[in-house]
Image: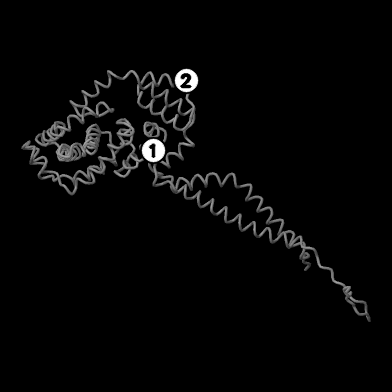
């Protein structure tokens, strides 16, 4: 069996390794960019502001902003249109002068609507915007709103219906916070405002199913059902306050402060949007941190990205796969580079030529000159 010469084998191996190395380099544009993006997203998993920044860099385009502004103006949602404009300016995304003027004109025409919203919020507790929140909060700060809402749940109980545990719990906790607000000269106002927003959203059915379940669990820990039932039947305000469990109120108040912070940074409409996509209290805390970064542009960020502005979500497995692919590519490239270098060095090494002495003669080394 004839074997190919060793030099030929070395050259063939070197050529094969070189082709592999070049192929890995050619695959870099397909592997590296998504792997780098995935790595950055995974690293920002616990930082909603950074996560949204990264995702907006891909999703927020001039065409998308123009389309969303037109849709918001057509729906009469000037608050969302203004938020989109604020986000575009923050991200240096161009908006044409015509759309910019239309947004400013729509925002300037809401004085009468603001007064009407305040009155509706004070009378019914419904919260749709900042003005209605101010009205609802004015009623809750004197306890009227909480007593009114607890009274509604009491009538349900007397009629044989199932009371809304969440609304009742938020109202009972609100009565306790109202007293603390006055005694602390307003220090507890953020928590009081947050409870008002949550209660209005719960009553209007604006909470996501998962968030409503999570808040109901917190409400059951914050309120003694037996005491609350007796208080609802008697209508005794002191008994309503006594129904609140001090040790169970703390998580609810922390949540209420996050909601108040979100409202203060981005407005009541942004809170409503966050309540639709949040799954639990932790998501609302992330939304508050998002509002710290984007301010007036928070609502637009939630509109563009949805729940992915707060969490990575179900795409985490895919992102980790891309990160693993990038690491695997880098390790393979390093290994192929080293192997290719060694193979080329062996294949291109000059052959040693050996001299043989003639029969009967001696091979004499030349003597170096002195």
Nearer the observer, 72 or 257: 257
Label 2 neighbour load within 10 Å: few <14, some 14-19, many 20+: few
Q: Residue furthest front?
A: 370
* Position above or below: 161 against 322: above
User: Can you tell which quarter of the image residue 296 is in?
Assistant: top left
- Please state, as top left, top right, bottom left or bottom right, where the C terminus lies in the image: bottom right
Q: What secondary structure is found at the residue carrying circle 1?
A: helix
Q: What secondary structure is found at the residue carrying circle 2?
A: helix
Q: Which residue is mark 2?
A: 97
Q: Report whether 42 appears left or right of 184.
A: right
Question: Can you tell which mark lies on residue 212?
Answer: none
Could you say where residue 71 lies in the image, as x and y percent from the top left? Answer: 41, 24
Cβ atoms under marks 1 and 2 closer than 8 Å: no
User: Can you tell which quarter of the image residue 161 is in?
Assistant: top left
Count of numbered marks: 2
The span from disc 1 to disc 2 (Cα, nearest Å) is 26 Å
Q: Residue furthest bottom?
A: 360
Residue in the image at 11% along x and 41% along y: 241
Q: Which residue is mark 1?
A: 293
Nearer the observer, 138 or 66: 138
């Amino acid at each position: 069996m004839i074997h190919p010469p060793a030099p030929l084998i070395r050259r063939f191996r070197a050529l094969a390794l070189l082709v592999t190395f070049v192929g890995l380099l050619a695959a870099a544009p397909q592997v590296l960019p998504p792997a780098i993006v995935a790595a950055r997203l995974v690293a920002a998993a616990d930082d909603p502001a950074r996560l949204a920044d990264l995702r907006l860099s891909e999703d927020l385009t001039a065409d998308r902003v123009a389309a969303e502004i037109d849709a918001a103006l057509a729906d009469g949602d000037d608050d969302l249109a203004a938020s989109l404009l604020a986000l575009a300016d923050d991200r240096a995304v161009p908006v044409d002068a015509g759309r910019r003027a239309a947004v400013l004109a729509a925002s300037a025409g809401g004085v009468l609507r603001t007064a009407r919203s305040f009155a509706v919020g004070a009378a019914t507790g419904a919260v749709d915007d900042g003005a209605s929140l101010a009205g609802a909060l004015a009623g809750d700060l004197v306890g009227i709103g909480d007593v009114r809402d607890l009274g509604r749940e009491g009538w349900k109980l007397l009629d044989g219906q199932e009371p809304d545990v969440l609304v009742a719990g938020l109202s009972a906790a609100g009565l306790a916070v109202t007293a603390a607000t006055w005694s602390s000269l307003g220090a507890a106002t953020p928590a009081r405002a947050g409870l008002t927003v949550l209660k209005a959203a719960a009553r209007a059915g604006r909470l996501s199913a998962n968030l409503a379940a999570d808040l109901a669990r917190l409400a059951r820990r914050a309120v003694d059902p037996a005491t609350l039932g007796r208080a609802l039947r008697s209508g005794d305000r002191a008994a309503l306050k006594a129904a609140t469990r001090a040790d169970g109120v703390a998580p609810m108040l922390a949540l209420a402060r996050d909601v108040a912070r979100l409202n203060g940074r981005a407005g009541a409409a942004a809170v409503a949007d966050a309540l639709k996509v949040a799954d639990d209290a932790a998501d609302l805390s992330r939304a508050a941190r998002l509002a710290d970064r984007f301010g007036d542009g928070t609502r637009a960020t939630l509109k563009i990205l949805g729940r992915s502005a707060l969490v990575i979500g179900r795409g985490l497995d895919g992102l980790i796969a891309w990160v693993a692919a990038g690491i695997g590519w880098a390790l393979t490239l390093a290994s192929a580079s080293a192997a290719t270098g060694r193979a080329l060095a062996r294949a291109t090494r000059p052959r040693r030529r050996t001299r043989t002495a003639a029969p009967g003669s001696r091979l004499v080394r030349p003597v170096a000159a002195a």
